[in-house]
């Protein structure tokens, strides 16, 4: 057996139901914490018009904030993952929530200086490193084995919750109050709720390297080393598919409200339709989470990554048709939820948990890079053509390519579960 390949879990004999009875509060608190991460991107489209009107910035200039965030988080994500591996998710995530709240609230202090806009995104990016998916998914994956797929699905629904609630809340606050008030209001309300749940509930079971007094010997997690992961073709294909899928989906998600308005619907109606992204994403994560634990092979990953091609076609051809746009929105949400879940889940299965923080931190660089590049390119394309057609047209074959990249990864490696000696 290769070094680092042994896997020992405190709950190795538990059924899925027993895992949930023991750790449901961990999943719930982590889900709320993760939801906060998605609020800035979920609401950026609604802030575009007010910022353009007050400061004269173009859509590309507004969307460049996401690019700055990607440039900061992409090289630093592996180091953030190493912090989680060394100190544990709780010690990293709790101060991260506080810093993220302060950084997001500070957007309400913008005065129109474009450099201030970019610097604000730098601070938000640095804070986000502590509360990215790595911290939450490591804690949840360490607590669940039999039902890890559905547990990760519920966790990742946090991003969908922010997609549903944040745009509606932001539209109300911007229209009835102001965009300057909306930023700190969103930050304090969301961050406060997250912290209130995380303090009592977000605790990893039996930290690595400690002794479980009920069962005796030290506990350890197994999986690939960082060097082994670097030579693993399956992980490279997951990273590439994730980058390509995220580049297109992030471009569309950030510009979704403007895209719907471009398609011929009103601002309020567009915000309501955009909320379906979150509904679809929740369905994508839960259904995928339930299927992936039961359906072997590459069918579930293929569907999750390739399905957006259908939605992009509907968005491309659905001008003025609210039903077509609504269906397309649900599909985009479903596919984004499914694909994001697949990235985290497949990483746990093909890499294991021994060095999950560092490995997923590296893979999540592709997430950050795609999320930064996509919205900027979409903004530049729209500013030059006043159309989103090129983005949607390119997205269709890219989605199909991503599906094929993850469809034939091969069987999951087996990390034998044994008590450490």
Image (cartoon, rainbow, N blue to C red):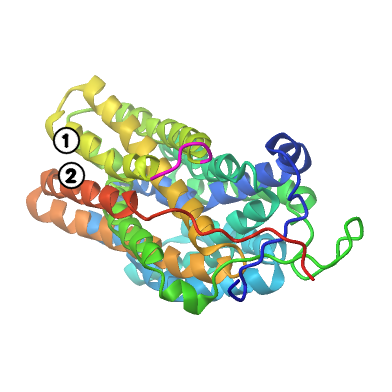
Quarter of the image with the N terminus is bottom right
Residue 56 shows up from this direction = no
Disc ID at residue 353: none
Image location (x, y in percent) of residue 126: 51, 70
Image location (x, y in percent) of residue 124: 49, 64
Q: Secondary structure at mark 2?
A: helix
Asked if residue 239 lies in the magenta stretch, the reply is no
Residue 171 shows up from this direction = yes
**On screen, residue 229 above or below 65:** below
Disc ID at residue 313: 1
**On screen, residue 184 above or below 219:** above
Compute the Cα span from label 1 to label 2.
Answer: 7 Å
387 left or right of 280?
Answer: left
What residue do we see at 62% from left, 73% from top? 4
| Most foreground residue, 369 or 410 | 410
What residue do we see at 85% from left, 66% from top? 217
Residue located beneath label 2 in the image: 396
**On screen, residue 212 above or below 323:** below
- State which region is magenta: 293-297
Image location (x, y in percent) of residue 191: 62, 50
| The residue positioned farthest toward the front in the image shown | 1
What residue do we see at 70% from left, 51% from top? 143
């Amino acid at each position: 057996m290769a070094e680092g390949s042994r896997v020992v879990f405190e709950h190795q004999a538990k059924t899925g139901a027993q895992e949930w009875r023991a750790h449901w509060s961990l999943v719930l608190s982590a889900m709320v914490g993760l939801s906060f991460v998605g609020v800035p991107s979920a609401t950026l489209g609604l802030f575009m018009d007010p910022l353009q009107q007050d400061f004269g910035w173009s859509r590309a200039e507004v969307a460049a904030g996401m690019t700055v965030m990607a440039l900061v988080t992409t090289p630093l994500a592996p180091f953030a993952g190493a912090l989680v591996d060394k100190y544990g998710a709780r010690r990293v995530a709790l101060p991260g929530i506080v810093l993220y709240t302060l950084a997001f609230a500070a957007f309400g202090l913008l005065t129109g200086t474009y450099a201030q806009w970019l610097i604000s995104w730098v601070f938000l990016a640095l804070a986000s490193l502590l509360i990215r998916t790595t911290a939450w998914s490591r804690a949840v994956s360490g607590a669940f084995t039999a039902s890890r797929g559905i547990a990760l699905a519920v966790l990742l629904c946090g991003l969908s919750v922010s997609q549903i609630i944040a745009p509606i809340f932001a539209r109300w606050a911007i229209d009835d109050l102001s965009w300057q008030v909306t930023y700190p209001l969103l930050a304090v309300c969301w961050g406060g709720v997250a912290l209130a749940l995380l303090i009592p509930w977000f605790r990893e079971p039996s930290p690595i390297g400690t002794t479980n007094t009920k069962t005796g010997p030290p506990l350890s997690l197994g999986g690939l080393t960082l060097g082994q992961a670097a030579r693993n073709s399956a992980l490279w294909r997951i990273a590439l598919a994730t980058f390509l899928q995220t580049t297109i989906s992030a471009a569309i998600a950030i510009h979704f409200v403007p895209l719907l308005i471009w398609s011929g619907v009103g601002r309020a109606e567009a915000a309501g339709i955009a909320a379906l992204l979150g509904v679809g994403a929740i369905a994508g994560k839960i259904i995928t989470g339930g299927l992936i634990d039961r359906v072997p092979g590459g069918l579930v990953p293929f569907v999750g990554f390739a399905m957006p091609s259908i939605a992009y076609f509907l968005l491309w051809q659905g001008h003025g048709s609210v039903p077509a746009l609504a269906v397309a929105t649900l599909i985009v949400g479903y596919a984004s939820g499914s694909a994001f879940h697949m990235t985290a889940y497949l990483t746990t299965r093909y890499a294991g948990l021994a060095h999950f923080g560092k490995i997923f931190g590296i893979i999540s660089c592709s997430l950050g890079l795609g999320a930064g590049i996509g919205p900027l390119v979409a903004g530049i394309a729209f500013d030059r053509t006043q159309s989103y057609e090129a983005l949607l047209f390119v997205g269709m074959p890219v989605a199909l390519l991503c599906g094929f990249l993850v469809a034939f990864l091969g069987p999951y490696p087996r990390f034998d579960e044994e008590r450490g000696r």
